[in-house]
């Protein structure tokens, strides 16, 4: 695997990105850590300049097994060990009746993550099923801590969309690792997750019933994948679109699942998410990182919000 996906393991069905080693779904946290290649610890070490003088108020965050520098941190910043994170994730899954599905290390160990499948799904249209997952992340990066994101997945094409578990946060719920595990907190967050998933069902169903004019789709794709020459401008011609926007238009009727809602805003949204998850980027590994933690994560949110806005205005 490349430097983007360092190690990975999965239980059950092959994940949408097609990466990782298949394992049993009844592993202990320590066994899952070992199989997913994250059974290592981190520590802080003093930093020195060339003449041996200590760098004040800064320390190097080191992966102990190979002395790799993951980040530069403050003296008072304490990392969360992978063993702590995996035990927390396992307790969270047990309290929420979820099954740990995938785990691994990204970006050379800077991001350790687990994906868990929630027992929650719906059909936008007959046969067009959406399953729900939670993405747990333990970043070995300064200023970051454990967090949870909701990632619904369209089964027919394995397109994903991130959703917040907080009414006030746009991206994630952060967790203080120093706080004792609280099952009631899990239930509260799962309640929010269920509400968010119901909202997702409402807008997906709405978009699947709203026809989209081709001229509106052109403008939509220009907003989602702007061309440097037309950014912020109204575009009416296919020829004026960026290369990515043209690709998104080209696959409107050929992407997996296009037959379920041909000519609708639901199809337009899924053209964008199919592009981000399966076409853009150098390979599956770079697409995975960007889809969850990079530019394509915010692009998906923008694509959904804009589709709803344009569908309501039509």
Image: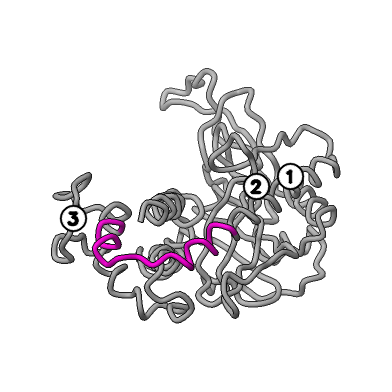
Occupied quadrant, residue 211: bottom left
The residue lying at 64 percent from left, 50 percent from top is: 196
Earlier along the polypeptide chain: callout 3 or callout 2? Answer: 2
The residue that label 3 is drawn on is: 235
In the picture, the quarter occupied by the C terminus is bottom left
For label 2, the SS is strand
Q: Is residue 212 left or right of residue 174?
A: left
Q: Position of residue 215 (x, y in %)?
A: 24, 63
Disc 2 and disc 1 in contact, CB within 8 angstroms: yes
Left or right of residue 71, residue 34 in this image: right
Mark found first going from the N terminus, 1 or 3: 1
On the image, the x and y values in percent for residue 134 come to 66, 56
Q: Which residue is mark 1?
A: 189
Q: Is residue 215 magenta?
A: yes
Element under disc 1: helix
How dense is the environment of label 1, judged by Cα within 10 Å: few (below 14), some, or many (20 and up)? some
Instruction: Please tell me in which quadrant of the rendered image residue 152 appears.
Output: bottom right
Residue position for label 2: 148
Quarter-of-image position of residue 140: top right
Residue at image coords 76%, 45%: 84
Is 237 or 230 nearer to us in this picture? 237
């Amino acid at each position: 695997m490349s430097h983007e996906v360092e190690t990975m393991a999965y239980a059950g069905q092959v994940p949408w990105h097609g990466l990782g080693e298949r394992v049993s779904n009844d592993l202990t946290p320590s066994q899952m850590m070992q199989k997913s290649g994250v059974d290592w610890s981190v520590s802080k070490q003093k930093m020195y300049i060339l003449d041996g003088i200590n760098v004040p108020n800064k320390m190097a965050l080191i992966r102990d097994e190979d002395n790799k520098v993951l980040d530069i941190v403050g003296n008072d910043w304490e990392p969360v060990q992978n063993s702590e994170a995996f035990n927390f994730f396992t307790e969270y899954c047990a309290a929420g009746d979820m099954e740990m599905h995938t785990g691994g290390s990204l970006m050379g160990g800077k991001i350790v993550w687990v994906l868990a499948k929630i027992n929650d799904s719906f059909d936008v249209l007959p046969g067009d099923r959406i399953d729900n997952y939670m993405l747990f992340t333990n970043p070995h990066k300064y200023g970051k801590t454990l967090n949870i994101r909701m990632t619904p997945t369209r089964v027919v094409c394995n397109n994903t969309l991130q959703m917040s578990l907080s009414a006030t946060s746009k991206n994630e719920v952060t967790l203080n690792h120093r706080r004792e595990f609280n099952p009631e907190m899990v239930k509260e967050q799962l309640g929010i997750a269920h509400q968010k998933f119901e909202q997702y069902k409402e807008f997906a169903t709405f978009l699947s019933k709203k026809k989209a004019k081709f001229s509106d789709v052109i403008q939509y794709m220009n907003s989602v994948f702007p061309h440097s020459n037309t950014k912020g401008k109204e575009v009416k011609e296919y020829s004026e679109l960026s290369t990515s926007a043209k690709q998104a238009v080209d696959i409107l009727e050929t992407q997996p699942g296009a037959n379920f809602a041909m000519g609708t805003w639901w199809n337009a949204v899924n053209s964008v998410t199919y592009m981000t998850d399966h076409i853009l980027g150098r390979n599956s590994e770079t697409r995975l990182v960007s889809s969850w933690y990079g530019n394509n994560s915010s692009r998906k949110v923008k694509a959904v919000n804009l589709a709803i806005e344009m569908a309501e205005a039509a």
